[in-house]
Image (cartoon, rainbow, N blue to C red):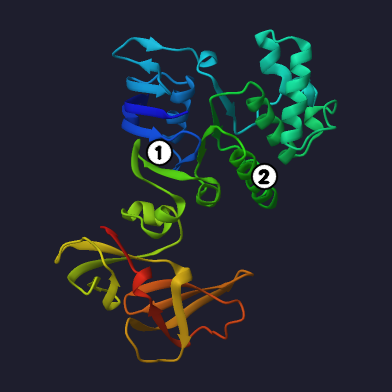
Amino acid sequence: MEIRVTGLTKHYQADGRTVKALDGVDLTIPANEIFTLLGPSGCGKTTLLRSIVGLETPDDGEIRIGEDVVWSRRKGIAVPTEKRGLGMVFQTYAIWPHMSVYENVAYPLTVRGTPGAQIAVKVAEVLRFVQLAGLENRPATRLSGGQQQRVALARALVAEPRVILFDEPLSNLDAKLREETRKELRRFLSQLDITAIYVTHDRVEALALSDSIAVMRAGRIVEIGAPREIYFRARHRFVADFIGRANLIDATVLGHADGATRIDCALGSVMCAGSEHAQGSQVTLCLRPEFLQVQGGTVAGPNLVHGTIEAIDFVGEVNEAEIRVGSALLLARTAPDAQLAVGSAVSIALAPEHCLLVAA
């Protein structure tokens, strides 16, 4: 089910001033995709999600689910939450502690007045899907965090919603369980013919789960794209920085030749992948740490810079090295068994295809 948001605005009063939680948001969420709203705290992503659900009342704009307008200030339409055909999984799971797993999952159907025999069939089916069959009679609070998250998912699915929405559902899990549950959730959602909207501030969750990502800042959509597009070909400095660790260096475009763009920056003259930035324009060079090819000693070659290692942190699967190159301090990720030492002179090869230029 496609969702279209047009000109959505929402203001709050805080400490005597007006805060724009949503600032004229225009957004189309394709049908049957996992679509993530990603951004820092306070960027408006949860307000947008809650507006789509009907838990927040916008100040202006329109929300359309499929062909149905569910909210419009101009048209005077405000469809209640329970009639929008949506399912939602909250950050806290919102599981009833006094109910069993079966009763929690059955609850949406029970309040609808669905016959008991139909409820039993639907609950059994959805519990098999989320791999909780056999736990029907267990008190919900006796489950692990990951299992409780699956109960919340089952409860959202049992009513066969047109769209399912997630508000940072993994944030309460520890790191290892969060990774395992994220993989499960991706597998579950990929098997469903359903639109899913996922809110998170965690870039790893967004990259791993999503078909598309909308990066938000200060109540606006900054950029939308597939995970690889957002990571490798971001167009804005904020997005390049937020979506992953990056070395960001101010630069000036010197010119274009043979499908490449040459810039001048603190690292010297660097050849980058071709861009549309005009000669003389101010841009930002984005270098991902994993693509900096660090070599011991000083060697010659194109797109090489030379520096000195100032710090090294061993973090298991990689070494993270801080390397001083002139006035710039670069973060590089190298193999964990690389023979590098603080104070060593190194050369760094910058592959042009991984020298990304974004708007300053």
Give the residue number, with chain letter if any, for mark 1. Answer: 43
Q: Amino acid at mark 1?
A: Cys
Front-most of residues 28 and 62: 28
Quarter of the image holding residue 155?
Answer: top right
**Image height of 47 relative to 313, above or below:** above
Q: In the rendered image of this protein, does residue 271 appear above or below residue 11?
A: below
Q: Position of residue 299 (x, y in %)?
A: 39, 92
- The image shows residue 283, relative to residue 40, as above or below, that is below
Q: Quadrant of residue 270?
A: bottom left
* Residue 39 in view (yes/no): no
Q: Quadrant of residue 348?
A: bottom left
Residue drawn where x is 46% and y is 81% of the image: 294
Picture quarter with the C terminus: bottom left
Q: Name the secondary structure under disc 1.
A: loop
Q: Is residue 66 left or right of residue 183?
A: left
Location of mark 2 (residue) = 184
Amino acid identity at mark 2? Glu
Q: Residues within 10 Å of mark 2 (few under 14, many from 20)?
A: some
Q: Is residue 159 visible?
A: yes
Reply above or below: 255 against 242: below
Count residues near mark 1 (Cα–Cα under 10 Å), then give few for <14, some for 14-19, many for 20+.
many
- Where in the figure is residue 154, as x and y percent of width and height? 69, 29
Q: Secondary structure at mark 2?
A: helix
